[in-house]
Image (cartoon, helix red, strand yellow):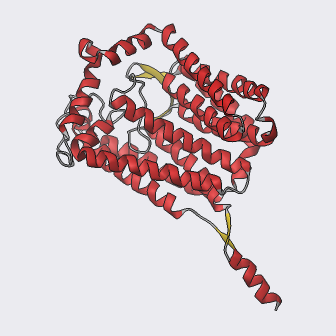
């Protein structure tokens, strides 16, 4: 009798793991590698005499990232709550170090050179801020309805935002967006969300006006054909327009042959539109929509508030980055230099994105579903 009762309990308390989320991630990675090779092989052959140069480097980072993702997914996510302060201080220190000993590539000083490797600390900052804010907010859920708590969160986050924004405004905007999302889901008062959104707008406007080259981007955005630096934007739009409904075919892009500079980075979505057409572009967008939906399912069923906030932070990061990247490529907003998650070239980016997804999978592993 006792054995039958134990079996009934086991049947009603099923351990959950989101395999559909894992399948979507692996599909996006495979698609990203195919598009990266298609987009970069010509430039890689011209620059390095090896058409697989960018693909090999991305593949190495991806394999390492997948290993890290699976390791993190097997670790209880609550362990990372102990390292919230270390994560923030470490990321802040690395971002500060970039200002003094950073390596400048393509006109931006955003990398640290560690032996043969180049690391972008701003990518580490995104993961650190998710762990940091999830830890803090989960400890004071009842206080998040107070305006003073919002001010405290802003004060805590601003040093990281300012130090990142000094060299990388787009990443600073993403970090602020993550903070807004976490405050929004944890606060019963939506007015605080409006206030924090206003802070982001004011902060962004101030940083744009402080540097002349940022203000120039606004002019280029409004009239790209009148400025030499609007060349990349125009060529990206030509690529999107020439793709039609079903595209020219995989590998058949003309704009990637030097017309769209560094097409494998921020502008890869324009090549997707050219080669796969509007249909392919919509499929890519839908993949990200499904991914965000799966994040929402995990967050809603998380075992505790900390887990839900971790997943929300990762969801906000990817959603904001996808929206901003597509908006830049289609010239809906000024060029901010934001990559398309899991598809654009960037070893540090894919490495830490997969680490974040490992956290989400860890949270999903802790879910228990009752079944009658």
The image quadrant of residue 222 is top left
**Direction from residue 142 to residue 337 in the image, left or right:** left
Residue 209 seen:
yes
Q: In the picture shown, does residue 306 fall above or below 192?
A: below
Of residues 35 and 291, which is closer to you in this image?
A: 291
Total residue callouts: 0
Query: Which quarter of the rendered picture does the C terminus lie within?
Result: bottom right
| Residue at 40%, 56% in the rendered image | 27
Residue 98 visible = no
**Residue 253 image position (x, y, % from top left):** 19, 40
The N terminus - image quarter? bottom right
Say above or below: 37 vs 144.
Answer: below
Q: Position of residue 92 (x, y in %)?
A: 64, 27
**Residue 55 location, x and y as percent?**
33, 45
Give percent across and percent down for residue 28: 40, 52
Residue name at image x 61 percent, y 23 percent:
161
272 vs 147, nearest the viewer: 147
With respect to residue 26, does 224 lie above or below? above
Q: Is residue 46 left or right of residue 78?
A: left
Q: Residue at x 54, y 39 (%)?
A: 317
Left or right: 174, with 156 as reference point: left
Q: Which residue is most to the bottom?
A: 1
């Amino acid at each position: 009798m006792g054995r039958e009762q134990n079996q009934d309990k086991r049947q009603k308390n099923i351990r959950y793991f989101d395999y559909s989320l894992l399948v979507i991630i692996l599909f996006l990675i495979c698609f990203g590698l195919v598009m990266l090779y298609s987009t970069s092989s010509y430039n890689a052959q011209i620059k390095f005499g090896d058409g697989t140069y960018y693909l090999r480097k991305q593949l190495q980072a991806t394999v390492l990232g997948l290993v890290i993702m699976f390791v993190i997914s097997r670790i209880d996510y609550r362990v990372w709550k102990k390292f919230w302060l270390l994560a923030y201080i470490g990321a802040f220190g690395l971002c500060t170090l970039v200002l003094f000993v950073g390596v400048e590539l393509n006109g931006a000083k955003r990398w640290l050179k560690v032996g043969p490797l180049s690391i972008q600390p701003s990518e580490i900052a995104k993961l650190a801020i998710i762990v940091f804010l999830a830890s803090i907010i989960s400890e004071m859920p009842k206080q998040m309805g107070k305006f003073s708590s919002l001010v405290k969160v802003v004060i805590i986050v601003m040093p990281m935002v300012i130090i990142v924004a000094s060299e990388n405004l787009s990443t600073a905007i993403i970090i602020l967006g993550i903070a807004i999302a976490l405050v929004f889901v944890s606060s019963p008062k939506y007015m605080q969300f409006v206030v924090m959104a206003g802070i982001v707008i004011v902060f962004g406007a101030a940083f744009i006006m402080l540097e002349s080259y940022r203000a120039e981007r606004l002019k280029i955005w409004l009239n790209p054909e009148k400025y030499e630096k609007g060349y990349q934007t125009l060529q990206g739009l030509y690529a999107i327009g020439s793709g039609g409904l079903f595209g020219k075919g995989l590998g058949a892009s003309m704009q990637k042959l030097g017309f769209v500079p560094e097409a494998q980075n921020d502008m890869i979505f324009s090549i997707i539109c050219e080669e796969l057409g509007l249909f392919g572009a919509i499929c890519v967008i839908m993949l990200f929509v499904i991914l965000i939906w799966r994040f929402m399912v995990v967050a809603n069923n998380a075992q505790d508030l900390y887990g839900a906030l971790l997943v929300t932070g990762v969801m906000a990061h990817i959603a904001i980055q996808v929206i901003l990247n597509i908006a830049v490529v289609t010239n809906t907003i000024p060029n901010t230099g934001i990559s398309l998650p899991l598809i654009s070239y960037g070893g540090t980016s894919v490495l830490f994105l997969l680490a974040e997804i490992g956290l989400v999978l860890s949270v999903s592993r802790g879910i228990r579903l009752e079944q009658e």
